Image (spheres, helix red, strand yellow):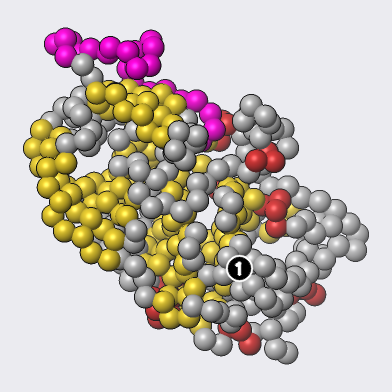
Amino acid sequence: MPFYHTLGKIPPKRHTQFRKPDGTLYAEQLFGTIGFDGMSTNSYHEQRPTQVKQIIKQYSVAPKIAKSNNIQSYRFKGFQVKPENDYLQSRSTVLINSDCAIQLAAPKQSTANYFYKNTDADELIFVHKGSGKLRTHLGNLDFKYGDYLLVPRGIIYKIDFDTQDNRLFIVESRRPIYTPKRYRNWFGQLLEHSPYCERDIRRPQELETYNESGDFLIKVKKQDEIIEMVYASHPFDVIGYDGYNYPYAFSIHDFEPITGRIHQPPPVHQTFETDAFVVCSFVPRLYDYHPLSIPAPYNHSNIDSDEVLYYVDGDFMSRNDVAAGHISLHPAGIPHGPHPGATERSIGKTKTDELAVMVDTFKPLMVTEDAMKIADEDYHTSWLE
Ligand SMILES: [Fe+2]
């Protein structure tokens, strides 16, 4: 996150002696990104964070691809993904390219006996159903319906759920995820025309610190494999940190929509950016107010980006037969637009209650076998009259 945060105890000067009450040194760790060029955090640990005890095993979690070159529009019924007890096993990749993986998950249980770290990707976890606490080595974040949780790569975490009824929409991004640059000034401060500001971004305020030795299982994701490792010290042993690289939460309900007299293009809904895809939030808003406006979107040919819409809640005016938890995929190369009747139906409407998350990728997405299990094979003909 491009603004400074500090939590816990830190010494007045970085890279200097910082001692425990017993006179021994805390272990300092610089947690950087993009070499030493990106955002970084300086953390202070009870024990050295380097104590690998054992590498137990590693196994592939790469999704099986059903269609690698796809030009067919699809609808996927996301709530048909079966709930699983385990958090990692519950994550089902439906669409993927070399930059990102789009996943659905219905985990029933909190991560009890292991920690998790994704070294491949930043994780953007959208909470569709459920609430709980994301616990990380850089502090905790409470979450509930409508929250985006952004976990930068390398953050060690566990996730606690309040109940067994949870639905998550996850984007794993091999490119760093940032707030849109056009909404930031040259100091990084969010500008007045930004649809959200720093006050809307929740940073960790609670730090769990354990000074414990023993066997601590960490499941590390690297190169589409899970590597199970044992560390000799508790991964949550940070006494304090400061910097720019930390997990944060942002609620879709805090996104302030930008509206106009005529139909506004999708970039007004943009919430996050990478150099390989964007994430947009479609939130309840007033419709266009030109006397002859058409609130439904015009047909459009996203010739060089795949468009993924995840439907969260409300009435999806431009689509027929779409429900919460559905995903539509409109691939690059062909135009798409409102379903028959939707344009006419939209005229005279003054507002919408729709809530949806959109991911537009610049490289084509491959469709996985897991996606085909929940696919509506006839969706691509749904524009026929
Ligand atoms: Fe579209």
In the image, farthest residue toward the front: 35
**Residue under numbered circle 1:** 306
Which residues are the magenta region?
Answer: 1-24
**71 over 183 or under it: above or below:** below
Residue drawn at x 41%, y 77% as measured from the top left: 65
x and y, in percent, of residue 267 in the image: 70, 53
Is residue 15 on the magenta stretch?
A: yes
Under mark 1, the amino acid is: Asp
Q: Nearer the viewer, residue 19 or 129?
A: 19
x and y, in percent, of residue 383 in the image: 69, 84
Is residue 95 on the magenta stretch?
A: no
Query: What SS does tag 1 mark?
Result: strand
Task: Classify residue 270 as left or right of residue 129.
Answer: right
x and y, in percent, of residue 111 in the image: 24, 51
x and y, in percent, of residue 23 in the image: 16, 9
Q: Main secondary structure of the magenta part?
A: loop
The reply to whether residue 283 is visible in this rendering is no
